[in-house]
Image: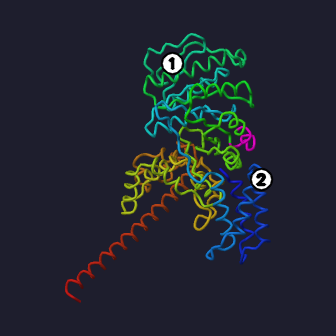
Amino acid sequence: MFENLSEKLQRSFKSLRGQGTLTDENINDALREIRVALLESDVNLNVARDLIEAIRAKALGAEVATALNPSEQIVKIVRDELIETLGRDTARFKFAPQPPSVILMAGLQGSGKTTTSGKLAAWLKKGGHRPLLVSVDVYRPAAREQLKVVAQSINAQLYEGKLDDTPTDLSSPLESASTHNLSSRPERSAVERPASSANTATVLRLAKEALREARNYACDILIVDTAGRLGIDEQLMDEMAQLKALLSPSEILFVADAMTGQDAVNSAKAFNDRLQITGAILTKMDGDSRGGAALSIRQITGAPIKFLGTGEKPDAFEPFHPDRIVGRILGMGDIATLLERAEEKLDRSKAESFAKKALTGEGFSLEDFRDQLRQIKKLGSMQSILKMLPSVGPFAGMQQAASNVDESQFTRIESIINSMTKKERANSALINGSRRKRIALGSGTTVQEVNNLLRQHTQMAKLFKGMGSSMGGGMKAQQRLMSQMQGKQRFGR
């Protein structure tokens, strides 16, 4: 995420390193490179121009901190202006005074709107809410079926309804999407259902029934997945406007594919002009995104970015924190998000047990090694973890190294350890030549890979043992010193 923009900005800052003071000349040189970096990263031309002018005004007009060199001064100014562009505060989620709160999901076809609706429902469930999902896309049956699959995967409630004009029977209790199907009638193809007033009537009926269903069964949030579109279609935009008038949504969230760059910005503007969106969600941020859409959407529409989709899994979804995103762009890392992810996903008791065992000399077995790998995998890919570290100081080069990480290597390591017996995992010294051949055959790897793993394990075991010894020695020395001090105080020496 933002790798291209981050790399280009880092290059522009290098030109100021070694300069004694900020001058018109070196400021103009740096701003020229920053402008090119922004435009190459698909930032809107007007947004880039406004951003450059704001940076120029601060660089020339503000008092310069004497503790900072010219490069650091420009980085600080760029950071402040990027945060201002993205929105200084993390956007708050709006809820209706009287439940259910309605969230209208808008966006072009292929932006990930249906998947994002499910991710949003899963995120809300973690916060103690009871969301109800409904698809009102009567033009593309696959969208309704996809939402049903997504709802089942996160165990969320789904209202399906029927596509004919017969009112749906709401007398039966609402159940989880994984156990209840409110519609058994097969849907007709999209070719048979062109946009028409009859279809719009069906859309509005489904939305109205879903709202009543949410009220009847104490669902405090209704997420409405609307019809996708390949382009801005006036008739379907009219349908969105009618849905807004019917449901009075607390949130109208525009879902944008971050990889489409300026197309996403133009679409967001069109939706905002018609519907006044309250926020945006950027999807596919784990792909080859230039980052320009993130910097442009808020400035063009005035609506904040509220969430980021960072992968395919339901939990690959996070709130948008402007200051943290700017930290990633400028190579400062995002330790706060990494710590939050660790707090949420890692088993604290297991981590403490492992640390105590490894550092007190009780040993570091291959089973411990496997458990730690599984813990790390819960945080996401190794690439995503490394990219959250700063690109300066002891972490310099980590983000560049992330692109060279072979994620499949972790799977092979786990396969090798799984092919060992329990005794072998507890005591690697038992693994002789014949056992290594058997383990390699069972894990689908080579003897050389088994040898490499055993060598790495031995090195790590020695490292932990050394750390434990130094810590223990330090603690004993500290205890001896405290005892001596207390003795002197006791005898008045």
Q: Is residue 39 left or right of residue 308?
A: right
Residue type at mark 2? Answer: Leu
Query: Where is residue 81, by image quadrant?
Result: bottom right
> Above or below — where is 371 with respect to 355?
above
The percent position of residue 405, horizontal first and vertical second, equals: 62, 53
Question: Residues in magenta?
Answer: 258-267
> Above or below — where is 93 with respect to 149?
below
The answer to which of 347 and 414 lies nearer the viewer is 347
Name, please, the residue furthest toward the bottom.
Answer: 493
Numbered label attached to residue 39: 2
Q: Residue at x 61, y 23 (%)?
A: 136
Q: Residue at x 54, y 15 (%)?
A: 183
Numbered label attached to residue 24: none
Q: Report how far apart the C-alphas of labels 1 and 2 lie in the structure.
A: 49 Å
The percent position of residue 171, horizontal first and vertical second, equals: 44, 14
| Badge 2 density bin: few <14, some 14–19, many ≥20, Cα 10 Å | some
The answer to which of 377 and 493 lies nearer the viewer is 493
The percent position of residue 216, horizontal first and vertical second, equals: 44, 22
Q: Judge whether residue 325 can be spotted in this image.
A: yes
Element at badge 1?
Answer: loop
Numbered label attached to residue 181: 1
Image mark count: 2
Element at badge 2?
Answer: helix
Residue type at mark 1? Answer: Asn
Q: Main secondary structure of the magenta part?
A: helix
Q: Do the residues under discs 1 and 2 have CB atoms within 8 angstroms?
A: no
Q: Judge whether residue 288 can be spotted in this image.
A: no
Query: Where is residue 359, by image quadrant?
Result: bottom left
